[in-house]
Amino acid sequence: MFPEEKQMTTATAESATPDSPADLEHSQAWAHGATPRRFAIAVVVLASIGLVASFALMLERIAVLVDPNHVPSCSFNALVSCTEAMSSAQGALFGFPNPLIGVMAFPVVVAAGAALLGGARLARWYWAGLQVGVILALVFVHFLIYTSLYQLGALCPYCMAVWAVTIPLFVMVTQRNLRLLPRDASSGWARAGRWLQAYQAPVLAAWFLLIAALAVVQFWDFFIALVA
């Protein structure tokens, strides 16, 4: 090969090579819909916990309807209790018990995670739909957190389990979609996704600590009475 041809070939190869590992990851994952195995495992585990909690709360709701004197297994004292949530208007915001939403929605997420674990490549429209779903779930969960803290004055353990899995599911799906749905790895959305991926543990820790702090402040008198 002549020197000129070799130089031209080298230049062509370099121009076809992504500028950084992030670009390479983005281009390969975008083209093939690749999803890390640990991501799929986390989705299955978190959504399964949400499903179990929703199903358990639904069973308690049915038990109360059958026997109004039934004491739910998740009611321990004046603060940690499911009774207030189940008997309130907020507990059936759309005309049916809220846990039914989780019973219907979480299996879809479990199935998606299981498919990813098996090596399936989910379409972009599916990821977009899942993003809409986790956004709506996040908004709904924070509405329920607000009502629990400032209106009902009680914390439902099964509800809190659903809160605890919905927030990380939102963060995980969002960072994945921000990184991989844009075609351009250098776009602002993709950079934001990579930042969220790198710092998702501190973000989640700060998020949960804020909710816990709000609960402690709101129920401070109850906690003081426990130790007094």
Image (cartoon, grey):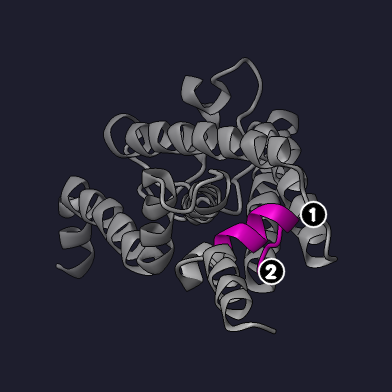
Which mark is on residue 154?
none
Camera-nearest residue between 64 and 216: 216
Majority secondary structure of magenta residues: helix
Residue 29 counted in the magenta span: yes
Camera-nearest residue between 29 and 139: 29
Q: Residue at x 49, y 47 (%)?
A: 178
User: Label 1 to label 2, Cα distance in Å?
Assistant: 15 Å
Which residue type carries mark 2? Ile
Q: Is residue 103 visible?
A: yes
Residue 124 counted in the magenta span: no
The residue stretch that appears in magenta: 25-36
State the image coordinates of residue 39 (x, y, percent, origin top left).
62, 66
Can you identify the residue that label 2 sits on?
41
Q: Is residue 11 above or below residue 92?
A: below
Q: Residue at x 61, y 80 (%)?
A: 6
State the image coordinates of residue 152 (x, y, percent, origin top left).
36, 32
Q: Residue at x 37, y 42 (%)?
A: 154
Q: Is residue 43 above or below residue 192?
A: below
What secondary structure is marked by label 2?
helix
The answer to whether 171 appears left or right of 97 in the picture is left
Which mark is on residue 121?
1
